[in-house]
Image (spheres, rainbow, N blue to C red):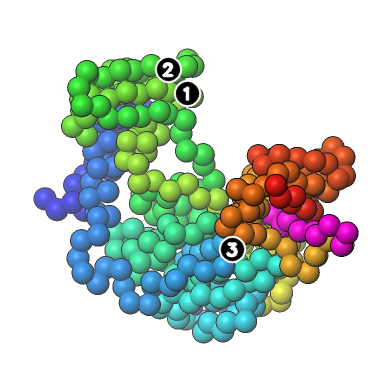
Amino acid sequence: MGILEKISEIEKEISRTQKNKATEYHLGLLKAKLAKYRSQLLEPSKKGDKGEGFDVLKSGDARVALIGFPSVGKSTLLSTLTKTESETAAYEFTTLTCIPGVIDYNGANIQLLDLPGIIEGAAQGKGRGRQVIAVARTADLVLMMLDATKQDIQRQLLEKELESVGIRLNKQKPNIYFKIKKGGGLSFNSTCNLTRIDEKLVQMILHEYKIFNAEVLFREDCTADELIDVICANRVYLPCLYVYNKIDQISIEEVDRIARQPHSVVVSCNMKLNLDYLLETLWEYLALIRVYTKKPGQPPDFSDGLILRRGASVEHVCHVIHRNLAEAFKYALVWGTSTKYSPQRVGISHIMQDEDVIQVVKK
Ligand SMILES: Nc1nc2c(ncn2[C@@H]2O[C@H](COP(=O)(O)OP(=O)(O)OP(=O)(O)O)[C@@H](O)[C@H]2O)c(=O)[nH]1
Ligand SMILES: [K+]
Ligand SMILES: [Mg+2]
């Protein structure tokens, strides 16, 4: 039996197994097996798998991948938001490679990648699915573009494809400490009440991966699936924005309903509707901030902000300004929302916020 057949056998068995206390261990094992075969499938095997036209260099402050079924309007969006033209047409699979464009927003260069449409079975190599998914894994954000005139099922299908290759959307990494040891058996602990897994199931799952010596510490009430994610270690956790395009074709009530869904933005690329809001939300989801620098006795330089990630400290700012600045750092003066007073004298670990102004004082 080939791997694909094994996977489909297990999927069938999982779907026909009732979920209850008695089948819990059996299901846990099946899921571990499934994850194992899927990762075998993903191993870079055959040559040419990477695919010509997909190895686009990462550039700019962040990378956004456009994922969606054929003809939902991905290329129309790229051509509208960036200076790059990507061919658009009414027929499916117009785009066959990865087309990069640059969105200039708040002084940041955001790399937007237009990609071929993906279809059900993409994860197993249908169409250019594998190459598209490989690019998605390298992104800071997935823009999942959907056709607002079509059913919700399209979104579930795409999510399933990404899920099956270890991409987790809008999810935090499970808070489980896991370390493989040379000996000593399994050391199992938890800092909270576990309602969805127990020591026996943890042990069974680990055995499936031929792991007999390990330290496992649950810091939250995780599921078997989440434990498997931690064991597999090749999962990527990405924010995802669902962009519903072609709202010019649906009723206002329907637009309203979709717009209220979590992580969703409604647009019309052809009619240029709501694209400003899309960019605002994109910025929010990328968690980028701007920090302006200021020299003593001079006004801040608002023309050229530094682009950083949310949570960046004064130390990060120093590294962006100059390679040796952190070493020479004495203190900094900061104006903005991150401080109580403006200016306020802060140390190197102070956390910056969007649109703060900073003046670094050297030793
Ligand atoms: N009604 C309507 N049609 C749109 C809108 N945006 C794009 N389209 C149309 O949708 C069709 C497909 O657009 P593309 O941009 O080529 O779609 P794609 O997702 O890049 O398609 P592939 O590259 O084939 O996967 C074209 O005929 C577009 O004119 C929109 O906002 N409203
Ligand atoms: K198309
Ligand atoms: Mg296209």
Asked if residue 233 is among those painted magenta in the image, a careful observer would answer no
Whole-percent x and y of residue 299? 87, 62
Q: Which mark is residue 190?
A: 2
Q: Nearer the viewer, residue 112 or 262?
A: 112
The residue at which mark 1 appears reads as: 219
What's the residue type where badge 2 is placed? Ser
What are the residue bounds of the magenta stretch? 286-298
Name the residue rendered at 80%, 60% in the picture.
295
What's the residue type where badge 1 is placed? Arg
Q: Secondary structure at mark 3?
A: loop
Position of 284 compared to 154: left or right? right
Q: Secondary structure at mark 2?
A: strand
- Residue density around tag 2, few if under 14, some if 14–19, many if 20 or more, within 10 Å: some
CA distance separating discs 3 and 1: 33 Å
Whole-percent x and y of residue 77? 60, 73
Q: Earlier in the sequence, mark 3 or mark 1?
A: 3
The residue at which mark 3 appears reads as: 61
Whole-percent x and y of residue 292? 76, 58
